[in-house]
Amino acid sequence: MDNPKEMKIVGKRSNGKIALYLVLGFVFVLVGVASIVFVVLASSSDAADEGFAVLAGIVFAMLGIGFLVVGIITLRLPKNLIAVSGTDLILLRENIVIKFSDIVSIIPRIARGRGLLYLFVAFGTIIIKTKYGEEFEQGSVAEVEDVADMLNKKIRKY
């Protein structure tokens, strides 16, 4: 690896995935708590329906808490993910250094949900394949297609 002062950050963590997890978590917790509150406040003669509604509320609340936890964990990931230094590509999360001459292809994989981009933000995973058969993935990269295009232009030089 060349001098670290010459390192240029080219791939940053996306906030789209974090926002998605946090919004979904909040909605699920809200629906779950609302379901439980409505059962407690409303008087019903059918105890089986009340039990099902409380169980559904608990499940929704637990799913929401799970989404919130994943969002907070994702928020703690490093902001800078991919860097370029001279003739090296550096995956900062795992501290992996790959020479440009060893890279066969860099493929962007956009995060999609049934044909729609999440929150209309292009984030996803960069897949790096080397001539030795190794495959490296770096997820949650913002503007994944632009980063992949820029890196592909750089590796064509080597």
Image (cartoon, helix red, strand yellow):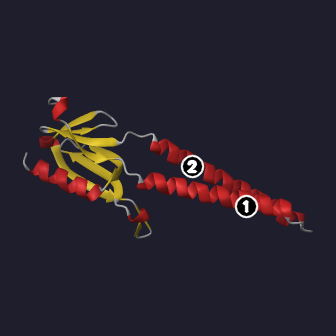
Disc 1 marks which amino acid?
Ala
Above-or-below relation of 65 to 45: above
Q: Residue at x 7, y 48 (%)?
A: 157
Give the residue furthest to the left: 157
Q: Residue at x 72, y 54 (%)?
A: 58
Q: Residue at x 40, y 70 (%)?
A: 115
Disc 2 marks which amino acid?
Leu
Q: Quadrant of residue 42?
A: bottom right
The location of residue 103, given as percent across then percent down, is: 17, 45
The location of residue 108, given as percent across then percent down, is: 28, 56
Crowdedness of circle 2 by 10 Å Cα count: few (<14), some, many (20+)?
Answer: many
Crowdedness of circle 1 by 10 Å Cα count: few (<14), some, many (20+)?
Answer: some
Q: Residue at x 23, y 41 (%)?
A: 83
The location of residue 64, given as percent across then percent down, is: 62, 53
Mark 2 or mark 1: whose residue is earlier in sequence: 1
Dot 2: what SS? Answer: helix
- Quadrant where the C terminus sits is top left
Question: Residue 25 bears which disc, if any?
Answer: none
- Quadrant where the N terminus sits is top left
In the visual, does 10 lie left or right of 122?
Answer: left
Q: Quadrant of residue 31?
A: bottom right
Dot 1: what SS? Answer: helix
Above-or-below relation of 100 to 33: above
Give the residue furthest to the right: 45
Q: Are marks 2 and 1 in contact (CB under 8 Å)?
A: no
Above-or-below relation of 4 to 13: above
Disc 2 target residue: 68
Disc 1 target residue: 34
The location of residue 90, given as percent across then percent down, is: 24, 38
In the visual, does 74 lie left or right of 136?
Answer: right
